[in-house]
Amino acid sequence: MTTITLENALLRLVVNPEVGGSVVRFDALTQAGVVALMRPGSIDERDPNQLAMYPLIPWSNRIAKGGFEWRGQYYPLVKNLENEPLPIHGDGWQRSWQVVSQSARTLQLELRSNEQPPFDYHAELSYRLIDSRLEVALSVTHLGDQPAPYGLGLHPWFPRTGDTRITALAEGVWEVDKEQLPREWHRLTPESTWNFSNGKALPERLIDNLFTGWKGQARIEWPARGVELELTTVPTMSRYLVFSPHAQADFFCFEPVSHVVDAHHSVSSLTEGLVELASDQATSMTCQFSYQTT
């Protein structure tokens, strides 16, 4: 299995195009040694969920009822993850991406997918190291004859330590049901357990919830490790999802996403973040991960 390494004086990135275009490792190169900025994976790992980050395309998270209706036509979706009853995260993370170009600090990948109607698309995924910043760009062009709803996102896995702290503005959060589908939206207050707007540690119990009213910027701090990451999305994304199973877990996920979970079944899908693309139309997102010592 071939991985590709990008490196500059401050950062090192290892990518496996064959495994969903996933990031295997993202490390800071400090005077004290290598510091993992995302949960490190193995170069031999075939499961993207055991790696550092992967793309979410053509949708994020779960879709209820095993499919959805769009413009009067029902589209069944295939379950794509063991022990998960609902289709999840699209298919881009489970496909082999092709290398378009690469250099010491940049990598351009592409994917052609047409096996899951109504999604018939060409995607591009690029990684670029710029000084102390990783820039990830994801775009999709619809190639099908009939319009289809698209969503984008990134699924990074970060190290969870006892002092990990997240700062990310939000106005509200979706409570979920037993299938982890949105059940009820709540406005956040300063006293809310999950209000990360002014900085907060992760909760001790399970969190797997989507937040709304984001301004596209977040900070993740690891005080004892002496590092932090600033996340910035372009264009500004207004939703993020936080996942961690419990306080003993060694990871958590902070996922910038374009749409709410199961937006495909919302009566207002296009106001919940999905973008309907006609043939040859495209949508895109960029996320910058900026590292600094503290």
Image (cartoon, rainbow, N blue to C red):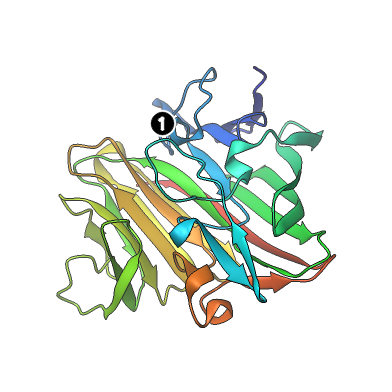
Q: Quadrant of the N terminus?
A: top right
**Where residue 150 sits in the image (x, y, percent)?**
64, 64
128 vs 63, left or right, is right
Residue 14, image quadrant: top right
Residue 65, placed above or below residue 49: below
**Where residue 238 sits in the image (x, y, percent)?**
48, 73
Q: How many marks?
A: 1
Foreground pick, 94 / 52:
94
**Where residue 77 sits in the image (x, y, percent)?**
57, 52
Residue drawn at the location 56% of the way across and 71% of the way down: 236
**Where residue 183 sits in the image (x, y, percent)?**
30, 71
Residue drawn at the location 35% of the way across and 74% of the way down: 170
Q: Amino acid at mark 1?
A: Val
Foreground pick, 220 / 66:
66
Residue 185, image quadrant: bottom left
**Few, some or many C-alpha atoms within 10 Å of disc 1 (few <14, some 14-19, many ≥20)?**
some
Residue 273, placed above or below residue 220: below
Which residue is disc 1 drawn over? 35
